[in-house]
Image (tube, helix red, strand yellow):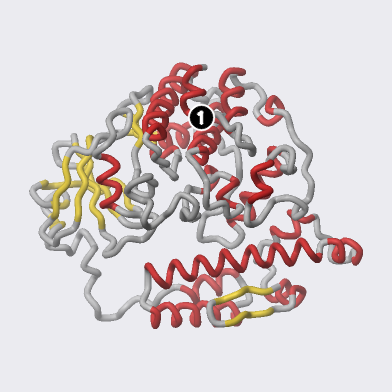
Amino acid sequence: MQWAFSGGSLTVGANEEKKRRPWKPNYGAQLWGADAATASLVSTKTAAWANWERFVALQVQERLDFVSSESLPSRDMSEAIAIEQAAYDNSSSREEYDSACQPKAPTSSPPPSHSPTFSPALTQSSSGIRIGSYLNCTPISEGITSEVFRSQAGDKALKVIVAHQNLEPHNPLREIKILQTLSPPCIPLLETFRDQEQRLVLTFPYMPLTLADLLDKGSSSSSSNCTLEKPQIRSIFTDALNALQAIHKQGIIHRDIKPSAILLSSPSGPAYLSDFGTAWHPEFSSLSEPPTAKILDIGTGPYRAPEVLFGNKSYSAAVDMWALGAMLAEAIRSPPAPLFESRPVHEDGNQLGLILSIFKTLGTPTPETWPEAKEFRVTPFELWTVFPPREWDVILPHVDAGFRDAVARLVRFDGSRASAQEVCRV
């Protein structure tokens, strides 16, 4: 077992590593069907293992290059790697490792300036936060680069950019440019301004619900009839498809289609597509991300398309359609549940786990079922345990046949994945 870093490599014996850290997931063994006691199987997988090591090494290197160039000064980056490596070497459990990697809280330093409670631009009033001229704003959510608040009047959502520099693919200035070219059913951008600390603020109409809210409510319901209603699903997903059709006509790829990005004015809609912070635009993105060298760190959990997982930087708007299909499959299940399993992004093996789940659900792809993958930098062929293909009436039993057919046209490996325009015609 070997991990490649930007200054050398670290080699750990596989058996020793497993004894020291049994909490580490062994997705590779599941994917290859590895049996340590079977020497012949080990020998036949040597080439595949070497290919996989190169794939993992490339991903680790890309991630380190990204973090070191975009997030941390070089000195801080090297210190961070050293701290994490020491934690990895000295920990005997996942809990010890996580604890050792946590930054130590300062004992006398004041709270960070980007905290809304202590910021002059986001000052605390009697019942909320002041953001520029907006008083008594209440927090709604927060992400990697921004915090979202609801205005006192309740009709506006204010997205405050708290990151001090762009963390690609997040780029708020590009997000503004893209939003200015769009109209409903994409969420309309009402205004932008700088607060007293010159933080960028984007203002949108406030929407009380998201599709994620409806799915979470259904999945946690104790009722035996907790599915979304067919007219409700049709209304919400028609709006989402119309939004995707509009942006794809402009060559825009959203790159983070997920239930929380579908805003709702009521449980039955209208629905609005939001969260364009990582979107790719053929004009605004081409200098930093050429069409054949797009960033791979896109998407969320179980909605990530397989071509991205296998390092295809020439991906297209089809990644949005895969995500929409996975989202539709989740909505029509009873109770609602993701079609694929995915660990949180910060957990070990999250990407391998998602690949395994996709292959178990759909079957392992072949050069015939996924011909485009033959040109990928890393192909999915001959690396994995072969899972047999499954029919969609087995994957999604007891659901509306029309919805199931739509999912089948979207959640597929090959290039015949349906476009938004094609699905809208049905």
Q: Is residue 57 above or below residue 133?
A: below
Say what secondary structure mark 1 lies in.
Answer: loop
Tell me if residue 270 comes above or below residue 108 in the rendering.
Answer: above
The residue closer to the viewer here, 382 or 2, is 382
Give the residue pinned by disc 1: 419
Judge whether 15 appears above or below 30 on screen: below
Q: Quadrant of residue 288?
A: bottom left
Asked which quadrant contains residue 208, the reply is top left
Left or right, residue 3 beside residue 209: right
- x, y percent for residue 168: 38, 58
- Which quadrant is home to the N terminus? bottom right
- For the point 32% across and 33% down, which residue is it? 186
Q: Residue at x 63, y 52 (%)?
A: 376
Q: Name which quarter of the figure residue 5 lies in.
A: bottom right
Most extreme residue toward the left is 133
Q: Judge left or right: residue 198 versus residue 73.
A: left
Residue 347 image offset from top left, x and y in percent? 55, 60
Q: Amino acid at mark 1?
A: Ser
Q: Is disc 1 surrounded by few (<14), some (14 to 19) or many (20+) residues within 10 Å?
A: some
Q: Residue at x 78, y 39 (%)?
A: 388
In the displayed structure, does residue 344 sit left or right of residue 174? right
Query: Where does residue 175 sit, x and y in percent of width and height?
Result: 30, 47
Q: Position of residue 222 (x, y in %)?
A: 53, 31
Q: Which residue is depicted at the point 51% across and 77% down?
A: 84
Between 347 and 61, the residue placed more toward the observer is: 61
Front-lying residue, 300 or 290: 290
